[in-house]
Image: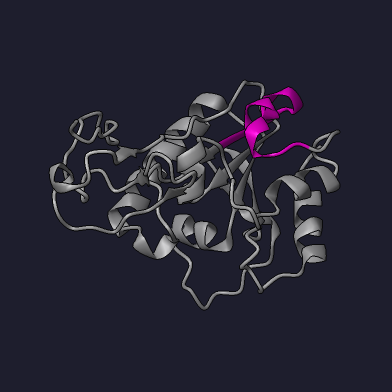
Amino acid sequence: MRPTCVPAEDGRASNSWDRCNGIARVPGAGAWRALRVQRPLASWHPDIVVTRNRLSDHVRPPLRVLLVGINPSLRSAAIGHHFAGPSNRFWKLLYESGLIPEPIGTEDDGRLPEWGLGITNLIARPTRGIGALRRREFAEGERVLRRKIRRWRPAAVALVGITLYRAIFERPAEAVVTPGLQAERLEGAAVYVLPNPSGRNANFSYAEMLAAFGSLPR
């Protein structure tokens, strides 16, 4: 049986790693993992099935806050839910900051609209890290995000990660950015910056992250 490739972002199926750069699942292995190979998928082991889940936006106006990530992790793409990394503190921060009334996890991301929250990503393509993203993907992602904001009209946009804020507002890497409410607006919406809640982010303490999440409008 030939490997199966889920349609890429442009809706067309692919049989090369460049076009279907996603997640490989080996039946019986019990885990998802990225396979870095450069040969066509047809030359792979026939039991390998390549999938690439495009994460759904979870939005239902009226929106109090639209939460915006940079792009999905490989783990999120594998299971089809936002902020799915085992060390990611996003969901814990939402609850402990009082933005949601009960603790939930990545598998409950579709419930965010219950509390006036929405979630999306700037870039749809999943990667192991943001270093793999291309400049043109940021530019196209910003155009799409601005259209979404005009359509959904959130009161506030929360950019999850200082890198995301710098990319959208063209701030240099050395620019100091303080999390919380910013002076800029995005298509009329107030702009907040949240620290990246990844467990690998050593630039902010958990208390600082919690304060930034707690600054979002209720």
Residue 190: image x %, image y %?
A: 65, 44
Q: Is residue 19 magenta?
A: no
Residues in magenta, as a range: 104-119
Residue 147: quarter of image: top left
Which residue sits at x=63%, y=21%?
61
Between 85 and 91, the residue placed more toward the observer is 85
Residue 8 falls left or right of residue 150: left
Between 23 and 213, the residue placed more toward the observer is 23
Predominant secondary structure in magenta? helix
Residue 39 falls left or right of residue 85: left
Query: Which residue reaches farthest front?
Result: 28
Which residue sits at x=70%, y=39%?
105
The answer to whether residue 153 shows anywhere in this view is yes
Q: Is residue 110 magenta?
A: yes
Residue 114: image x %, image y %?
A: 73, 23
Residue 133 falls left or right of residue 103: left
Between 70 and 45, the residue placed more toward the observer is 45
Name the colouring of the figure: one colour
Residue 151: image x %, image y %?
A: 50, 25
